[in-house]
Image (cartoon, rainbow, N blue to C red):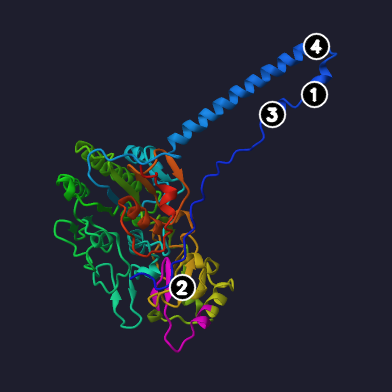
């Protein structure tokens, strides 16, 4: 279900400023007074020198103009989308590498990711996840174009404040899943979609029935190679039967990141494995003669940051100011979410907790700040849902909250923090007929991807929080 109010437009990527300075070095050189040289016996030499300078400047200007045109063409400026050579209709393959922090692509040799980047379009400083930077909220934002407050999946685990029912990551009841995901948008328009795993894809909703053979129920034990083979199998169908939209999901390197943090050799190995899977996919598409026809969008859902138990804030340490019963706390790290009982004012809870945290008497207290959800920074878009608890705490990067002290001395990795923190960024690479080769674009939020896909497929989008004009800033013009 789309938000009732008109979604606030997201910030658009600024257009490249191609205006040139109207002043010309050549014009400046021609402004000297020739009469001043008429009585000077060396005036012929002076004129010769000036002429040589002028010719040199003209040559340099011509070279600069040629370079500008060359690199503009290389980056896709003012160019058109490439025609399909074998497929009869556009196809988008959306791939997620869970927890692929921006920068992981530099940890090891990634020839296949490098190939997609060199011949496609990349968010140069990464893709910005939605808040909270968690797996379920972000994967569902990518396919609905909605912030979590509007698509309903506000955390990986949460409670319905009215019924008390609990949402878990195994819950496929459609009452939780609002908005219109891409597979449903595609089905609404009489087209075929296929999902080899994605958050929410198993939910029967609207015109989407999770059809057998075109909707894989999540099973983490399925080898990555088999997932790639399942996608390639769709390209063996008659051209008119090939799904126009497909998803492919890998758990790595998130799985390793939680155990060892972002800087362990296990991450390097996981990244190399993801690259090998992309190589297998590319080779399979090339064998079928469709690689250049398919629009591949490679993303992650969030980044990762290292955490250790020395970076803790203990809620029981706030007891001299306020006691926070465990029954109030719906999540702790990295998103502290508190739902006090109806007879307790959320504002009072926030005031007392912040007083304690700022007192200097609570270890690491200044690394946590509490908000009534309506007073959270508006850029987080995290208030317009009853499912969001009324008290939200934002932690600084790498810190954790726990109810009580323990003797654990664990180090690992986490995500879920403020999406303005750079370590929460992930990757975006687009490769295909409508993506310029070698183009770099500024970072953008992942809610823009929904409109990007519908634009490539030339289908009508459902209402969403993305900008309708955003695809024009990323995609090549249609021929």
Q: At numbered mark 4, what does the secondary structure look like: helix, strand or loop? A: loop
Q: Is residue 120 left or right of residue 34?
A: left
- Nearer the observer, 84 or 211: 84
Which badge, 4 or 3, is on the more N-terminal residue? 3
Q: Residues within 10 Å of mark 4 (few under 14, many from 20)?
A: few
The answer to if 201 sits in the magenta stretch is: no
Residue 295, image x and y in percent?
Answer: 30, 46
Residue 311 position (above or below residue 476) = below
Q: Could you give the CA–CA distance between mark 4 and mark 1, rounded to whole angstroms? A: 15 Å
Is tag 4's residue or tag 2's residue first in the polypeptide sequence?
A: 4
Q: Residue furthest top?
A: 41
Q: Which mark is residue 67?
A: none
> Which residue is the site of mark 2?
392
| Tag 2 and tag 1, C-beta contact below 8 Å | no
Mark found first going from the N terminus, 2 or 3: 3
Indicate the quadrant containing the C terminus: top left, top right, bottom left or bottom right: top left
Q: Residue at x 28, y 67 (%)?
A: 169
Disc 2 residue crowd, few under 14, some 14–19, many 20+, Cα 10 Å: many
Element under disc 2: strand
Query: Which numbered circle lies on residue 27?
Result: 3
Which range is magenta?
Answer: 329-350
Q: Nearer the viewer, mark 4 or mark 3?
A: 3
Which of 319 and 178 lies nearest the eye of the viewer? 178
In-front residue for pair 313/206: 206
Instruction: Determine the CA span between mark 2 and mark 1.
Output: 72 Å
- x and y percentages locating residue 203 in the rendered image: 23, 67
Let me know if residue 270 appears in the view: no
Residue position marked by numbered label 4 in the rendering: 42
Examine the rendering and report whether any part of residue 444 can be seen: yes
- How many numbered circles are shown? 4
Residue lying at the far bottom of the rendered structure: 343
């Amino acid at each position: 279900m789309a938000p009732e109010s008109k979604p606030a437009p997201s910030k658009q990527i600024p257009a490249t400023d191609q205006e040139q300075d109207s002043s010309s070095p050549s014009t400046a050189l021609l402004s000297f007074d020739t009469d001043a040289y008429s009585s000077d016996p060396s005036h012929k030499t002076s004129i010769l020198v000036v002429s040589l300078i002028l010719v040199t400047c003209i040559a340099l200007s011509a070279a600069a103009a040629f370079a500008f045109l060359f690199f503009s063409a290389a980056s896709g400026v003012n160019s058109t989308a490439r025609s399909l050579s074998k497929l009869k209709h556009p196809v988008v393959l959306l791939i997620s590498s869970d927890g692929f922090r921006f920068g992981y692509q530099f940890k090891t040799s990634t020839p296949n990711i490098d190939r997609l980047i060199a011949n496609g379009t990349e968010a140069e400083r990464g893709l910005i996840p939605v808040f909270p930077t968690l797996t379920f909220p972000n994967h569902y934002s990518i396919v609905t174009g909605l912030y979590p407050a509007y698509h309903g999946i506000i955390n990986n685990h949460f409670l319905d404040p009215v019924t008390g029912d609990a949402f878990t990551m195994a819950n496929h009841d459609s009452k939780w899943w609002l908005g219109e995901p891409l597979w449903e948008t595609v089905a609404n328009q009489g087209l075929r979609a296929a999902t080899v795993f994605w958050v929410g894809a198993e939910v029967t909703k609207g015109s989407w029935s999770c059809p057998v053979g075109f909707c894989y129920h999540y099973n983490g034990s399925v080898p990555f190679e088999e997932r790639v083979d399942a996608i390639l199998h769709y390209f063996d169908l008659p051209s008119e039967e090939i799904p126009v939209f497909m998803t492919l999901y890998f758990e790595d390197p998130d799985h390793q990141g939680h155990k060892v943090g972002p800087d362990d050799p296990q991450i390097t190995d996981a990244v190399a494995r993801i690259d090998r899977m992309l190589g297998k996919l590319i080779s399979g598409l090339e064998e079928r003669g469709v690689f250049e026809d398919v629009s591949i969008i490679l993303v992650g859902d969030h980044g990762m940051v290292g955490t250790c138990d020395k970076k803790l804030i203990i809620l029981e340490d706030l007891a001299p100011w306020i006691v926070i019963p465990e029954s109030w706390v719906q999540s702790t790290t990295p998103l502290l979410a508190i739902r006090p009982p109806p007879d307790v004012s959320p504002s009072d809870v926030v005031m007392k907790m912040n007083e304690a945290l700022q007192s200097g008497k609570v270890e690491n207290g200044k690394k946590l700040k509490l908000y009534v959800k309506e007073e959270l920074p508006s850029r987080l878009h995290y208030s317009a849902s009853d499912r969001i608890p009324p008290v939200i705490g934002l932690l600084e990067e790498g810190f954790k909250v726990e109810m009580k002290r323990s003797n654990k001395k664990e180090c690992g990795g986490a995500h879920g923090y403020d999406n303005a923190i750079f370590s929460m960024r992930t990757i975006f690479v687009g490769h295909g007929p409508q993506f310029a080769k070698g183009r770099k674009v500024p970072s953008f939020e992942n809610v823009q991807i929904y409109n990007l896909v519908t634009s490539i497929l030339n289908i009508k989008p459902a209402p969403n929080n993305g900008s309708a004009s955003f695809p024009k800033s990323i995609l090549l013009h249609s021929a």
